[in-house]
Image (cartoon, helix red, strand yellow):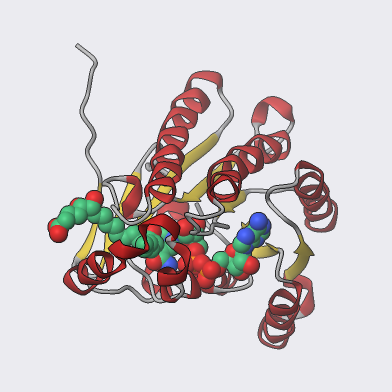
Amino acid sequence: MELNGKIAVVTGAALGIGKAITEILLKNGAKVALLDVNETAGKSLKEALDKQYGQERTLFLNCNVESEEQIKAAFQKTADNFGGIDILCNNAGILNETTWEKTVSINLVGVIRGTYLALEHMSKLSGGRGGVIVNTASMAGLGPLLSCPVYTATKHGVIGFTRAMAAASTASGYGVRFNALCPGFVQTDLFTTIPSKLGQFSHLADATEKLAEKFGILTVSEVAESLLELVTDETKNGEAFLVFPQGKKYVTFPSFSS
Ligand SMILES: NC(=O)C1=CN([C@@H]2O[C@H](COP(=O)(O)OP(=O)(O)OC[C@H]3O[C@@H](n4cnc5c(N)ncnc54)[C@H](O)[C@@H]3O)[C@@H](O)[C@H]2O)C=CC1
Ligand SMILES: CCCCCC(=O)CC\C=C/C=C/C=C/[C@@H](O)[C@@H](O)CCCC(=O)O
């Protein structure tokens, strides 16, 4: 997919991986709606991006992915302002094993909610142009992270949802591709605040720290480069793309077809 002039929505766009995704999409010619609950960071990022790309290329919209109403309004504003939606990056996520219901609500329910509402604009069956949806999962969506079982569950859920939606889209003719981005540890606020977020599993923080030392830590730019690959390569649908410091690969799952 050629990105020039395409319209993208990124959730959790104000900081971390979402910010890097926003920047790489802009660099490659897309217009981007930045959705985030952090209004201060979001507005300050938009100001910086306006200087580099011009104020017509971005929109900042205060939007909590836990709210159906807010997502609906943000997508409508994006479509009205830019003329449709071609790309959705469901990226917003948290790690908190104490307020674990909120972790499920943002990381998994938020992705499902965002996807269904975006399809109303993107699916060829409802007058859209088709496009691509990339969900930020995690390496913890492919294998268990012992210090955060609920976070692990949400990321496994995101990968399962993405793969099923890809198959549903092909079978139904939505014209929308679905892929999951699965990074290892990444240098962001979410990663650096881990010890205080593990709740009843805080005694396992050291084990996770050792794992991060063993695997290494990615930069947000490395993750954004991989996102770009998933967005632009039109052959990719239903993929889980594992990205870690030693390299990246498309994950092979067991096949149950005879
Ligand atoms: N940092 C890491 O090691 C890894 C992170 N991930 C995933 O990447 C995604 C982004 O994480 P990071 O950039 O690391 O986190 P971060 O904490 O640096 O940034 C997250 C952004 O999402 C926003 N956000 C949080 N809750 C929101 C909500 N309810 N609605 C809208 N926006 C919301 C925050 O305000 C923030 O701007 C998450 O889904 C995370 O699970 C995946 C693998 C590794
Ligand atoms: C608690 C930190 C979460 C940070 C946010 C993430 O999403 C990072 C996820 C990164 C890596 C996950 C790795 C999971 C690996 C396990 O399934 C297993 O392969 C580990 C094997 C143990 C070992 O090799 O020592």
Residue 134 in picture, x, y percent from top left: 50, 49
Query: Which residue reaches farthest top?
Result: 258
Q: Position of residue 37 (x, y in %)?
A: 71, 64
**Which residue is drawn at the image coordinates 33% and 51% (left, top)?**
140
Say above or below: 211 vs 141.
Answer: below
**Residue 244 horizontal side relative to residue 61, left or right:** left
Residue 66 image position (x, y, % from top left) = 69, 48
Q: Residue 41: which quarter of the image?
A: bottom right
State the count of labels. Answer: 0
Residue 70 seen in render: yes
> Which residue is at a point 42% across and 61% down the rendered structure image?
198
In the foreground, 60 or 235: 60
Image quadrant of ligand 2?
bottom left
Q: Is residue 41 left or right of residue 79?
A: left
- Let me know if residue 233 appears in the view: no
Q: Quadrant of the C terminus?
A: top left
Between residue 250 and residue 53, name the one nearer to us.
250
Q: Quadrant of residue 6?
A: bottom right
Give the answer, above or below, for where 167 lies relative to 95. above
Report the residue at 58% width, 74% height from top.
15
Q: Position of residue 232 (x, y in %)?
A: 45, 54
Indicate left or right for 99 with 225 as reference.
Answer: right
Q: Tell me what residue is drawn at x 21 percent, y 74 percent.
A: 213
Front-most of 161 and 76?
Answer: 161
